[in-house]
Image (spheres, helix red, strand yellow):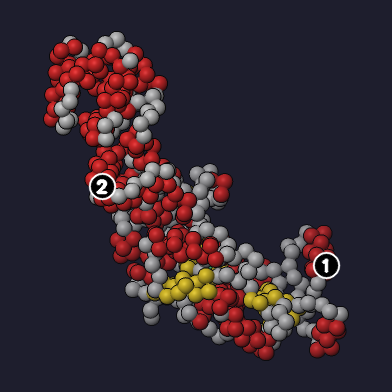
Amino acid sequence: MTVRVRIAPSPTGNLHIGTARTAVFNWLFARHHDGQFILRVEDTDLERSRPEYTENITAGLRWLGLNWDEGPFFQTQRLDLYKQAVQKLLEQGLAYRCYTTSEELEAMREAQKAKNEAPRYDNRHRHLTPEQEAAFQAEGRSFVIRFQIPDDREITWNDLVRGPMSWQGSDLGGDMVIARATADGIGQPLYNFAVVIDDMDMQITHVIRGEDHIANTAKQILLYEAFAAKVPEFAHTPLILNMEGRKLSKRDGVTSISDFQKMGFTAEALVNYMTLLGWSPPDSTQEIFTLADAATKFGFERVNKAGAKFDWAKLDWLNSQYIHAMPVDKLTDLVIPYWEEAGYKFTDGRERPWLEQLVSLIQPSMTRLLDAVEMGQLFFTDFLEMGAEAVTQLQQEGVSATLEAILTALGSQTLSADNAQEIIKQVVKQQNVKKGLVMRSLRAALTGEVHGPDLIQSWLLLHEIGLDKVRLEKAKS
Ligand code: GLU
């Protein structure tokens, strides 16, 4: 058997972290078994689906490296298939037209509430006679197609994550709506129905999705049976929770993959982190791995049932590990768009070697790619904002004379790593001050801060673009 799995996002929003993590697990499982990973866009909700969300979802999956083998398939292009399937169930008597009005449904719910019963459809139109149907139609009533759910059926499956699962038919809310009325009398399919028809048609062997779909699974199994189709295996993955243990939501800041991208997370770190949201490798001390690496080890026996807490500190740590280990030219490629987004323009390739020098200077202090904007600012603009600590440093006794001495010693020579050290030594001796004072003053004058990346390298870069003398002049006065 070839493993075939799918990710089936609805394009009603940007690619959500939960959907992306489900995609990761599907991808890993497919690759582990040399199987196929399919992308299906569930766009039957015409009011809420938008092409720009489809674009965001496919771009996000590609960016994360979650390449798919088939698709994207669009449900709106497959309506005939669903209609044929509805027709078949109608013919078999397993589905029927229900003419209950929304007012009647409302009254039904109120009555159930009054009796403290769970809301459900009472299956009142399950066995209408042709005459009754004709009468409802004559009244001008619209209809939905409902699929029969036997109350006394126990539905069971062995979930690959959660183990044996069991649902009682009577707990599924009564006969389920599978399609809404259309002019041809057959109907526009609803999610739970289209999913099953597609999963059958695409020969999906394993349905891997979030645990919020568990109740749907019970209904869907009954549909597979109605079509005498093989029921796939199911794996319901744990939800992603915030640090307080509640479902991660918009209130927790970002939830879509494009937001994480904007904040400066690398695709490799994010996908690595998502893999750890609910799964752990057999050697749980190993935390940094590529998707391909993880695929060799992935299996549901190591997926947790409990919700996975989203830990920003851990994600930041992983991201910094990837950034620090990255070749400078690759990191420069990744950082340039953030600089451009912040308004810096790079017109030709001439600044490239200099930009790479700058990147290698700030690389060890970076956690997110976006950090490069703030860290690079001091090299891109003449204006320097002085931090309070730098101001205090520059007000210390002897600092002005020290800076003056640095300028004199530098004179008109071109700065290099060697003569920079020479100049500092010379000034220490001549001014009879501690080396620490010279270094701290130099840093404060050049960068407006008292901490930061390698001082000599920073000075060299500022010297190259002619900003060092201006800043020393300004700081000494
Ligand atoms: N369109 C559904 C969703 O986005 C897919 C659920 C499934 O994988 O069956 O939640």
- Give the x, y percent position of residue 402: 23, 15
Q: Quadrant of residue 128?
A: bottom right
Please, what secondary structure does the residue beneath circle 1 have? helix
State which quarter of the image contains the C terminus. top left
Above or below: residue 337 compared with residue 229: above
Check disc 2 and report the residue beneath it: 350
Who is closer to the viewer here, 346 or 225?
A: 346
**Is the residue marked by circle 2 packed among few (<14), some (14-19), or many (20+) residues within 10 Å?**
few
Q: Quadrant of residue 130?
A: bottom right
- Give the x, y percent position of residue 404: 24, 16
State which quarter of the image contains the N terminus. bottom left
Above or below: residue 403 compared with residue 331: above
- Give the x, y percent position of residue 216: 59, 69
Could you tell me how many numbered marks the image carries? 2
**Is the residue marked by circle 1 packed among few (<14), some (14-19), or many (20+) residues within 10 Å?**
few
- Give the x, y percent position of residue 275: 39, 57
Q: Which mark is residue 103?
A: 1
